Image: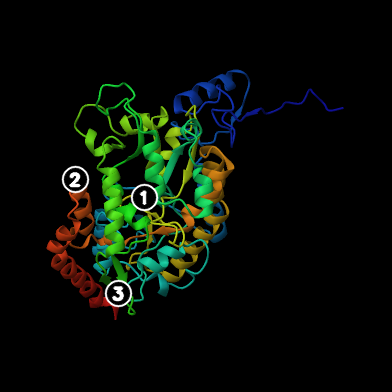
Amino acid sequence: MSDMSKKRIVTAAITGAIHLPSMSEYLPITPEQIIDEGVAAAEAGAAVLHIHARIPETGEPINDAVYGRNRTIEEKYNISIVNRPTDDIPGSARNAIMANSDEYDIMMGPLANSFANVLSQGGMLADLKNIAYIDLAKPWYDQNANAQLSIGGKLYVTMSDIGLVDKNATWSYLFNKKMIADFSIDDPYKLVRGGTWTIDKMLEMSKDVAHDVNGDGVMGIDDRYGYAGETYNLYIGLLSAGHQFFKKNNNDLPEYAGLDAASINSFEKFMTMLGDKNLVLRADDWYGKGPEVWGGSGVMDNAFRENRVLFFDTSMARVVFYRDMDADFGIVPPPKRDEAQQGYISSVSVNSCNSLTVPVTVSNFERTGIITDALAAESLQTVIPAYYEVQLKTKMARDEESGEMLDIIYGGRIFDLGLLYDWGGFPSAFANAMQSNATDIVSRVEKIETRITDAIEKTVEAYASFLN
């Protein structure tokens, strides 16, 4: 029998490591709640508090895996990992490189927004292929990104498992399972598996549910829609339909491919849908009209949450807003052009994703290569399972099928050069056509083709100045 006269030290784990608010209404998740519960535990006799950091909005123990990864690498290589966030990523990166400072070993920021797209053309980023110990063939680097983002045989930027933002920046379609059942329409999961989830099928299903609910003769904020999205979705919808407007030649240099009969046909289909205000809840139509549009509780999110939108064409980042929905929802990749298209394609927002780059000012590339590769490898083992298997598949997705769909979505990602470099404002031509409900995309593109090709030539010249 133990000696109960000996003193004991009581540790209170007030948040738990994997527990969620859905498991107990008493789980503290905000800083204030954690402080209050910590004080209460101390007053009850606890000498030690064991706390896992949480995101107040969701209660997710999201930082645990990242913290554990960093500690593992720090201890293994006897280093300190210092994260230096900044409100001006491009400016901070450029200033450090121009000052020949080696304060950054790796830099992670968006592909566009004057970060990777500008720094790489300025010769400020190292070729990842030439950094010893970075093994780009390993699964902790995105192989689609490696192939699509290279230029002239060099790779100045890619995607890795070190960051998670690019996963959230991946486009998908959310669908309302209650509406699917109520209207007895086809199961999107079965359509995806059978290769029949196409633009035409999505349009057909959307038309089945759209309705002027309040009967006032005008489709408004309280009515039911088949589809929700924004004008940006037109261009990325064409990418998901397998259309490549920019390709790379045998020298791995970009060239303008332009429009063809198939892409024009897809454009017309999307215009038919996105231009039909009796069918589509379009975010752009509500900007400046009074009500909040996004933010988790705006026009778009509320419509989906309240079972008034069948399909929501959006990024994975928005999935977190619907975890408390009463009705179930599913996740599928964007639709194909037709059944002949090989595989499903999901676009990644170049303005939101977090890319991996190494500045040319690094003083010890061998050390940087070793640590970078180790971080990415450890992320695949710890961070990605926490994010992908637990957060997305288990906590956000409502069914096993959504997990299956996530594999398809992340396996078919595209990093479009047109969006990345915005040559001649090509993507904007589609958004502008959508805004004015114009179908003359051929003539609109013809007017800017010289600007497009000139811009590509300047990009190639910029890289050529230091490629050799």
Instruction: Residue at 32% x, 79% y: name it.
Output: 251
- The mark closer to the camera, 3 or 2, is 2
Amino acid found under the numbered disc labelled 3:
Leu
- Compared across the picture, whether 154 is left or right of 439 comes to right
Q: Which residue is mark 2?
A: 437
Whether residue 350 is visible: no
Marked residue nearer the N-terminal end (3 or 1): 1
- Residue 59 in the image: state x and y as whole percent: 50, 32
- The mark closer to the camera, 3 or 1, is 3
Pick the front one: 364 or 340: 340
The residue tagged with tag 3: helix, strand or loop?
A: loop
Marked residue nearer the N-terminal end (3 or 2): 3
- Residue 31 in the image: state x and y as whole percent: 45, 28
- Compared across the picture, whether 227 is left or right of 143 comes to left
Instruction: Residue at 59% x, 37% y: name it.
Output: 18
Q: Which residue is mark 1?
A: 84
| Mark 3–mark 2 distance (CA, rounded to whole Å) | 34 Å
Q: Which mark is residue 429?
A: none
Instruction: Residue at 61% x, 27% y: name it.
Output: 47
The residue tagged with tag 2: helix, strand or loop?
A: loop
- The mark closer to the camera, 1 or 2, is 2
Amino acid found under the numbered disc labelled 1:
Arg
Q: Which mark is residue 253?
A: 3
- Residue 167 in the image: state x and y as whole percent: 44, 50
Residue 42 lies, with reference to residue 147, above or below; the image says above
| Mark 3–mark 1 distance (CA, rounded to whole Å) | 34 Å
Pick the front one: 345 or 227: 227
Dot 2: within a 10 Å radius of its alpha carbon, few (fewer than 14), some, or many (20 or more) residues?
some
- Compared across the picture, whether 168 is left or right of 423 comes to right
